């Protein structure tokens, strides 16, 4: 069973970084390596599933009142939102799926059981993704003071939703390319008000999280079966209790992160997250150089 202190630290890192535009995956991978943990082990996969679930519930709890006033206030408003959310999610799945397949075929040279998840622990790939996210956030943050003419009720336009969905697809295969940072920044750069971009971005996150969690759960089951076939028994029962604790902690850390994000976004300090990502990219490059 994983030491509870490490679970607590990872839950706080995941809860804060998942919902701040700084890439939770990059921070969690670095934290795991510094603590001597294997990001690809079944125990870590189980913990990651539970932490993602905790942050998803944090998003729902934080934005529910806003969504009720905007997306669920009437049948027409819900229809407008649903069409845009479906459009954005379809683009995410298509672009993310194509990229995932292309990376697996090129990076693994046709290995039959290769999965992109095997690359997620590589800091030499995490660092440039953080760099790219930081540049996008910085550009959007420096431009966001320009007045934005809001149209189309309380929803983003189809074009804005499409751009946000497409960029979300680019984020899926790359650890370090912050989903929230990239999608909110893309919404702002495409003309959406920052509050609308934030609201729609996290609605997309709630739609996307269950399939991601399911995929991780299936990978966990597959790893356990393969280990059993090779005569190795993986006991996850002891990890369930600590993972549940991690989920609860990730929930509360996520609420803190969302309040922080909204405050900086509304007060014109969005660009600071971009600067942080640029600095973090340099740190990750250095850690890779040291052999992590």
Image: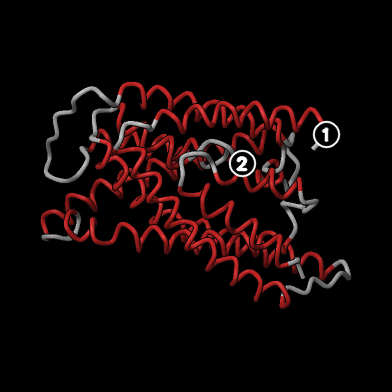
Q: Which mark is residue 26?
A: 2
Which corner quadrant holds the N terminus? bottom right
Marks 1 and 2, the one that precedes in the sequence: 2
* Residue indicated by mark 1: 291
Q: Is residue 264 above or below residue 36?
A: above
| Left or right, 36 with reference to 252 | right
**Foreground residue among 250 and 170:** 250
Which residue is rendered at x = 32% and y = 43% of the image?
Answer: 198
User: Position of 8 compared to 258: left or right?
Assistant: right
What secondary structure is marked by label 1? loop
Badge 2: few (under 14), some or many (20 or more) residues near its Cα, within 10 Å? many
What residue is rendered at 51% in x and 49% in y?
A: 18
In-front residue for pair 284/111: 284
Q: Position of residue 7 (x, y in %)?
A: 67, 62
Distance from disc 1 to disc 2, alpha carbons, whole Å, reads: 16 Å
Q: How many marks?
A: 2
Residue 176: image tag = none
């Amino acid at each position: 069973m994983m030491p509870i202190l490490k679970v607590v630290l990872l839950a706080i890192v995941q809860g804060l970084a998942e919902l701040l535009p700084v890439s939770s995956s990059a921070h969690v991978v670095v934290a795991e390596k510094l603590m001597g943990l294997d990001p690809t082990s079944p125990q870590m996969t189980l913990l990651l599933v539970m932490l993602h679930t905790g942050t998803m519930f944090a998003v729902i709890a934080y934005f529910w009142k806003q969504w009720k006033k905007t997306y669920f206030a009437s049948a027409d408003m819900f229809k407008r939102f649903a069409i845009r959310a479906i459009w954005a999610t379809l683009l995410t799945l298509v672009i993310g799926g194509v990229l995932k397949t292309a990376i697996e075929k090129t990076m693994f040279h046709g290995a039959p059981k290769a999965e992109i998840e095997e690359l997620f622990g590589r800091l030499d790939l995490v660092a440039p993704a953080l760099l790219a996210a930081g540049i996008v956030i910085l550009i959007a943050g420096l431009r966001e003071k320009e007045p934005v003419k809001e149209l189309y009720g309380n929803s983003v336009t189809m074009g804005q939703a499409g751009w946000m969905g497409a960029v979300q697809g680019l984020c899926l295969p790359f650890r370090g390319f912050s989903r929230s940072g990239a999608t909110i920044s893309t919404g702002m750069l495409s003309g959406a008000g920052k509050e609308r971009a934030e609201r729609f971005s996290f609605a997309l996150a709630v739609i996307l999280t269950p399939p991601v969690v399911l995929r991780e759960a299936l990978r966990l089951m597959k790893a356990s079966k393969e280990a059993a076939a090779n005569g190795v028994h993986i006991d996850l029962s002891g990890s369930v209790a600590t993972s549940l604790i991690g989920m609860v902690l990730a929930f509360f850390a996520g609420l803190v992160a969302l309040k922080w994000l909204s405050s900086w976004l509304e007060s014109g300090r969005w660009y600071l997250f971009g600067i942080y990502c640029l600095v973090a990219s340099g740190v990750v490059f250095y850690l890779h150089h040291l052999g992590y």
